[in-house]
Amino acid sequence: MKMSKDKSTKLDKTKKRVLWRWFLNGGASLNYERMMGLAYTYSMLPFLKETYKDDPEGLKKSVKTHLQFYNCSPYVSPYVMGINIGIEEKEKTKALDAIASLKTGLMGPLAGLGDSVFVVIPWTIFGAIAANMALEGSFVGIGIWVLVTWILKALGYPLYKAGIASGTSLVTSIEKRLKAIKECVAILGLMVVGALIPTVVKANVAFTFTQGDLTMTGNEILNQILPGLIPAAVVFGVYSLLGKKVKPVYIILLIIVISIVFKLLNILG
């Protein structure tokens, strides 16, 4: 009983270290290839090392899984991390595919919620108050801004606990159905990513068609054939290159070069 209690206490401290690391480093490693994936993995490392202390191969596999692309509001990400911990603590490597799918499926909807509730609304209100006070020469405005920022960060603690409880409950209640969950959430994730393609990938065709009073841009003409045709083609090309094990950095450089060439040739506007 004493060993079990000690282990539980140690895990509790480890989980707190995970959250504290995220508070300090959640947005510190943004890059085009993985976005917040590195910060996510760095924050999870204390938990992963404890969970896989007798399984070095499992640790490697878990770290590689968490280094994948991740992009979400840092204010609500503790909930995702909590779910991750709740599942992985019990299922370890057996649940890594399901965890990756859960992260992909949740990060999109939670990013929109987090940006609205934790960024747009409070920053607009308290940011305006702090800015006006600062313009009048009051240092209180700076204090308000810092205080509100840390209060918003502190709300990650109950979200983190709720995530751990959700993950633990998920494994306990439907332990034998993780494969089905993985497939369902993977479909959700693909739908979210697919819906984002036309809004994130931009490529404006330079030519225009004019006949009488009618004028249509190249994009409008192509959208009549298939909405989002160019973004879909670009994503398909990138996906094909990734399938051939081409490094993401090389793909990014290739896109930059092609964009410059097409702009010089007046193909893209």
Image (spheres, rainbow, N blue to C red):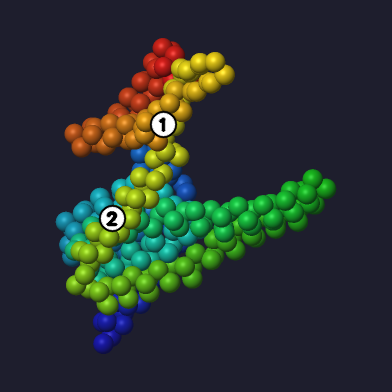
Which sits in the foreground, 249 or 263? 263
| Label 1 neighbour load within 10 Å: few <14, some 14-19, many 20+ | few
Asked if one can make out residue 259 in the rendered structure from this viewpoint, the answer is: yes
Question: Does residue 82 lie above or below 205 as drawn?
Answer: below
191 to the left or right of 77? left
Name which residue type carries label 1.
Gln
Name which residue type carries label 2.
Ala
Which sits in the foreground, 249 or 109? 109
Spatial CA span between label 1 and label 2: 30 Å
Question: Does residue 171 lie above or below 230 as drawn?
Answer: below
Question: Does residue 129 lie above or below 261 as drawn?
Answer: below
* Image quadrant in which the N terminus is located: bottom left
| Residue at (47% x, 68% y) in the render | 159
| Residue at (42% x, 64% y) in the render | 79
Say which element carries label 2: helix
Say which element carries label 1: helix
Which numbered marker is on residue 224?
1
Number of the front mark, 1 or 2: 1
x then y, percent, for residue 87: 29, 68
Asked if one can make out residue 98 in the rendered structure from this viewpoint, the answer is: no
User: From this viewpoint, which residue is outermost toward the bottom?
Assistant: 1
184 to the left or right of 117? left
Which sits in the foreground, 77 or 224? 224
x then y, percent, for residue 141: 74, 54
Q: Disc 1 or 2, which lies upstream in sequence? A: 2
x then y, percent, for residue 187: 29, 54
| Residue at (45% x, 39% y) in the render | 199
Which numbered marker is on residue 186?
2
Which numbered marker is on residue 41?
none
User: From this viewpoint, which residue is outermost toward the right?
Assistant: 136
Which sits in the foreground, 229 or 138? 229
